[in-house]
Image (cartoon, grey):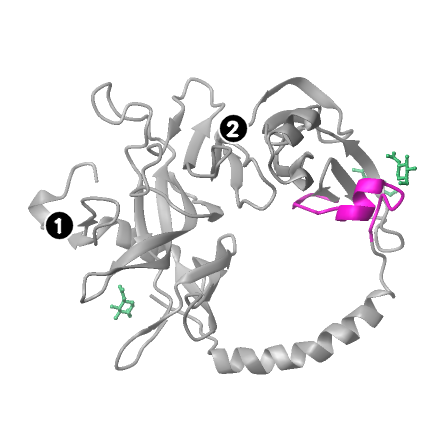
Amino acid sequence: MDWLLLSWRLLLISLLCCVSCVSLLSSESYRYPGFQGLLQDNDTLRLGLDFQRMLRINHMLYITARDHVFAVNLTTASEAFVPQLKLTWKSKDVSKCTVRGKNSDECYNYVKVLVPRNDETLFACGTNAFNPTCRNYKMTSLEQVGEELVGQARCPFESSQSNVGLFAGGDFYSATMTDFLASDAVIYRSLGDGRPVLRTVKYDSKWLRGPIYSVILCHVSYFIVSLHVVDSAHTDSSAVLQVVFSRVARVCKNDNGGSPRVLERYWTSFLKARLNCSVPGDSFFYFDVLQSLTNVLQINQRPAVVGVFTTQANSIPGSAVCAFYMDDIEKVFNGKFKEQRTSDSSWTPVPDEQVPRPR
Ligand SMILES: *[C@@H]1O[C@H](CO)[C@@H](O)[C@H](O)[C@H]1NC(C)=O
Ligand SMILES: *[C@@H]1O[C@H](CO)[C@@H](O)[C@H](O)[C@H]1NC(C)=O
Ligand SMILES: *[C@@H]1O[C@H](CO)[C@@H](O)[C@H](O)[C@H]1NC(C)=O
């Protein structure tokens, strides 16, 4: 696997440079149009706009925030950054939300999903004061089309939780936490025409655990989600240590779920592999915590993704940029197979003749 690497020493140097960059930037940035919007709004004065997502479609830039979606026309934005369209979508459940005793700063509608559904329609979901809800909107006018639908498993309950969502072949794929307590992580497929709704197994951390960072749509038949998981590592004294690993997980677009006896309504194509971002040496030094991942790019004319990784929280602080070729990732999914018997046991290799089919 090829990688690009930035040692933590290099990073430190660039961080020092950035201190001067930032002061330069703040004075420089006044020369360019900016958008702070809604300064008269009391909630915004207190909490800021809290931007969540950006989506560019041709010359329009859609920006989602707390209780609002803005659409900026980029043809004219070089002179003044003024939204051409503004949508206000507030939660009606605020009183119920404050009763639930969670942080009242979350009793708003943080718009966490905004994706094109077809050439004319945008699909949006918001946390809606701990009651996630989705709607369809006309791209050109931000007018609502049709009825609201339940946002659970499509959108998280809180603004701070990571989530991803996209439409592919008429199906909506989402990766998020599905419950109020954020204990059930899911990769979910729904809204398709005639295709079964599928998900990862509930409350089973052997499948998924921890936040999910990115979704990559592959040209062939599948779709990849990248996540980082908290996992247990067994030390020599067999004490269990909580460490974070980053994994790439795959589900196939043509998966129709299992039979009524096995994995009905669940993915049968789910596989995951560790993202290995390391510096070679006498012993490998690993950057295991994924912070961010790009979409598929071309590197050396080969499709690849680039991620920013850091070390474990209790380790020497360091960061690295690693690139992974998509065909190498595919090879890994067809390569050697390991299993985990229980969710806190270690991963053990499975002999070739015992690899389950399909995997
Ligand atoms: C905003 O706050 C001011 C001062 O606290 C208050 O008088 C006003 O009614 C508030 N406006 C809204 C829309 O809540
Ligand atoms: C963006 O602004 C340009 C110039 O005013 C206008 O011609 C164009 O129709 C606008 N685009 C959209 C999508 O509204
Ligand atoms: C990570 O990659 C290196 C270089 O290919 C390899 O030697 C090492 O064993 C890998 N580590 C794990 C945990 O797979």
Query: Which kind of residue does numbered mark 1 sit on?
Result: Val
Q: Residues within 10 Å of mark 1 (few under 14, many from 20)?
A: some
Report the front residue among 313 and 188. 313
Quadrant placement of the N terminus: bottom left
**Looking at the picture, how far across and down is residue 286, in whole percent?**
36, 70
Q: Could you tell me which secondary element the residue under label 1 belongs to? A: loop
Q: Can you tell which of label 2 and label 1 is closer to the viewer? A: 2
Question: From where the camera sits, is residue 74 visible?
Answer: no
Q: Which residue is mark 1?
A: 350
Residue at left offset 79%, top offset 41%: 43
Query: Contact (CB < 8 A) between labels 2 and 1?
Result: no
Residue 108 vertical placement versus 296 (above, below): above
Where does ligand 1 appear, by image quarter?
top right
Residue 6 vertical placement versus 254 (above, below): below
* Magenta residue check for 26: no
Question: From where the camera sits, is residue 305 visible?
Answer: yes
Report whether 55 appears left or right of 354.
Answer: right
**Looking at the picture, how far across and down is residue 169, in whole percent?**
48, 30
Magenta-tinted stretch: 35-59
Q: Could you tell me which secondary element the residue under label 2 belongs to? A: loop
**Looking at the picture, how far across and down is residue 314, in whole percent?**
42, 68
Q: Which residue is mark 2?
A: 152
Quadrant placement of the C terminus: top left
Extreme residue toward the left, this view: 353
Residue 122 vertical placement versus 81 (above, below): above
